[in-house]
Image: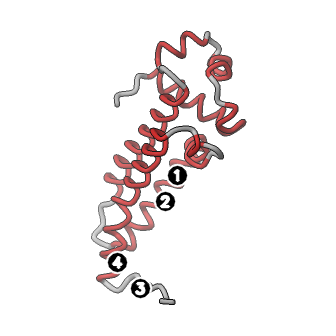
Amino acid sequence: MEITPRQFEIIEAAGRILTASGVSGLTIKNLAKEMQFSESAIYRHFKSKEEIIVAMLNFLADSIDSRLTNVIKSSDPEENFKVLFSEQISFFKKNPHFVVAVFSDGLMEESQLINETLLKLMNVKTKHLMPLIMEGQQKDIYKKQFLPTN
């Protein structure tokens, strides 16, 4: 999904509201107030609160995928693992509202579409982490942990 500059501003404002008030505080009315324009102006860019949250999560997933693809350059899985997490920490320090958006209380109860988008986001992280972990295990950098049987 291509996000226009105005949609991105709305997404960031929604993130600030989520940070301050949680999912219940994220209403079109509160968002319009935060943006300092009318509710109808919000609806020109997004059909609903759900669509705003989904756009935010999709933006985050695409951003993570792009950034992590570009930072993993070493042939050392341990170094790549560290770089991957450093990149994420750096991004979230600059954009704390995205952390809150993902971990906001009640978000998973909002809708099935939001749950599916959260799963997409988790899959993006897994796509980058699993090869590093598996390679590290093969090179005996990381130990394979077996769960005890009952």
Residue 38 spot, x, y in % from top left:
61, 10
The amino acid type of the residue labelled 4 equals Gly
Q: Which residue is mark 4?
A: 136
Q: Residue at the spot x=45%, y=33% of the render?
A: 55
Q: Earlier in the sequence, mark 4 or mark 1?
A: 1
Disc 1: CA contacts within 10 A as few (<14), some (14-19) or many (>=20): few
Report the Cα–Cα distance between label 3 and label 2: 22 Å
Report whether 73 appears left or right of 104.
Answer: left
Q: Earlier in the sequence, mark 3 or mark 1?
A: 1
Q: Earlier in the sequence, mark 3 or mark 2?
A: 2
Report whether 80 appears left or right of 44.
Answer: left
Q: Which residue is mark 1?
A: 90
Report whether 108 appears left or right of 54.
Answer: right
Q: Earlier in the sequence, mark 4 or mark 3?
A: 4
Report the Cα–Cα distance between label 3 and label 1: 27 Å
24 vs 86, nearest the viewer = 24
The amino acid type of the residue labelled 2 equals Ser
Q: Which residue is mark 3?
A: 143
18 vs 108, nearest the viewer = 108
Report the Cα–Cα distance between label 4 and label 2: 18 Å
Residue 62 spot, x, y in % from top left:
37, 42
Element at badge 4? helix
Q: Which residue is mark 2?
A: 86
The amino acid type of the residue labelled 1 equals Ser
Report whether 80 appears left or right of 15.
Answer: left
Is the residue 103 above or below the residue 13 in the image? below
101 vs 142, nearest the viewer = 101
Disc 2: CA contacts within 10 A as few (<14), some (14-19) or many (>=20): few
Is the residue 78 above or below the residue 141 in the image? above
Q: Residue at the spot x=64%, y=34% of the render?
A: 16
